[in-house]
Image (cartoon, grey):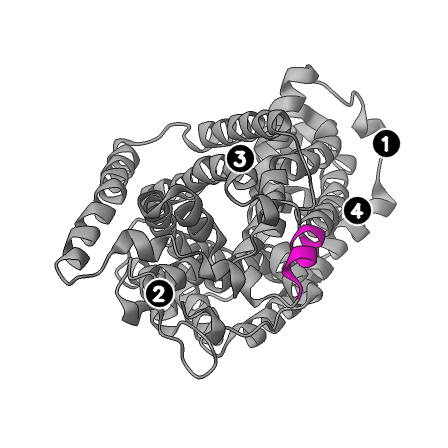
Amino acid sequence: MQTNKLRRVLGFWDVFFIAVGQIIGAGVVALTGIAIGMTGPSVILAYFFAGILVLVVSIPIMIAGTSLPATGAYYTWSSRVGGGWLGSIVLLLILLATISLSLYGSSFGLYLNPLFPALSVNQWGLLIIVILGCTNLFGLQLASKVQMFLVLLLMSALAVYAGFAIPQLDTVLLEPMFPKGIVGFITAVFLLKFATGGAYLVVGLSGEMINPRRTVVVVMISATLAVVVVYGFVALASVGVIPWQEMINQPLTVAGRAFLPGWAMTYFLIAGAGLAICTTLNSQFIQLPRSFMVASWDKLLPEWVGVLNRYGAPYVIILGMLAVGAMPLIFGLDIGDIARAATISASFPAFIVFWVVTQIPKKYPEAYKQSVFQLSQGWMWALFLFSEFASVVGVYFLAQDLSATVIVVLMLWIVIAIAYYPLRKRYLASKGIDLDVLTTDEEIFRS
């Protein structure tokens, strides 16, 4: 196991800004209007309860993250607890999600092109993917500092949006608070879970954190709550200046035009909506390679895939991600349907990981004693069922009006994910290598 080649360079603030950048994406710009259509002015409270829901659902991840901190956590936990085949399925499902990089790129272009038409939408997208991908080639420490800078700019833009609105708030517009009733409110909470989730992904960086057992749980809680507070003010601005009916299914820019001066609107579009996409994109470049690194060290993937450069960056994986994200933009492909498949695919590993966590107390009792939460088996299973339910609801929202293309891609990829491990195992066995032994090596937890 090559985890000793990784340096523990990430402190609390590095991980905090990575988490915040992962949480704040284009979702707050697009989903706020949809949630307003579901619940009206109570969208402000819906964001708060969505954050609480995210934290409750994330408790299993906190348990695993503080019991067994590890690089590439989703793959590592699944393979060590459930076996190499299960880990392989998780890995392949994560792999499909990398196509969403092109979606982030094109979304960035949609905001920048109207302001700076010298480059097309796809050219802007290609540019940002190349810049952030190349930044990550110089190591985790630089990438985390870039993330910190981008997140601070992003937060300033959201502060500008809310700051200009607050002096113009009309409390009359906030009544009635629940025009769609409790059902509409709960529906909005589950929808906004997408906009407030994401901090849990930092567990994959545990092997490179200075104090992972403390940092994982503190960052997951503090980053989620910090973003919820910001989102609450953004939501208040969106329903407190213009009638909420005008914001139904509309982006934040519709409300912004009512109270933002021209320069502030431009700044919000670039540093707010644009950088929201950039921070999520950079987080993907930071976090996704870790699972593939460990899988290559296990020989589940060819070993050359996980080779590190002199900056400690898995350059082959990063360049591969860059190519996957760039090619649809270069060739002008319509990646909308495939990106939806990728987004749904990225939700599937959680179903497996939640089950894996229930097995930790039994398989790793000493490690479990170090967990931030000490739950009985009954509470573990109750939390498991609730987390799975929340994930099912989330996939339901993502799967609305799925096209035949998305369904076919998902079914085909699931078949590939199931078939890959037995084929790889047979190939390595012909060379005298036991893949089952490598993918269940527990040395990674002691690195």
Q: Does the magenta portion include 158?
A: no
Question: Label 4 sits on what residue type?
Answer: Ala
Dot 1, how many residues are within 10 Å of its Cα: few (below 14), some (14-19), or many (20+)? few
Please state the horizontal and vertical placement of residue 263, each as a whole percent of the image.
69, 62
Disc 2 and disc 4: Cα gap in Å? 52 Å
Q: Are marks 1 and 3 in contact (CB under 8 Å)?
A: no
Disc 1 and disc 4: Cα gap in Å? 12 Å
Extent of the magenta region: 211-219
Is residue 135 in view? yes
The quarter of the picture where the N terminus appears is: bottom left
Q: Which residue is mark 3?
A: 358
Disc 1 and disc 2: Cα gap in Å? 58 Å
The structure residue drawn at horizontal position 67% and vertical position 24%, both measured from the top left corner, is 39
Is residue 444 placed above or below 81 in the rendered structure? below
Please state the horizontal and vertical placement of residue 30, each as a whole percent of the image.
56, 42
Task: Assign a secondary structure to mark 1.
Answer: helix
Residue 271 horizontal side relative to residue 232, left or right: left
Question: Label 3 sits on what residue type?
Answer: Thr
Q: Which residue is mark 1?
A: 171
Q: Which label number is shown at residue 165?
A: 4
Disc 1 and disc 3: Cα gap in Å? 47 Å
Task: Assign a secondary structure to mark 2.
Answer: helix
Q: Earlier in the sequence, mark 4 or mark 3?
A: 4
Q: Viewer-nearest of labels 2 and 4?
A: 2
Residue 206 falls in image quadrant: bottom right
Disc 4 and disc 3: Cα gap in Å? 46 Å
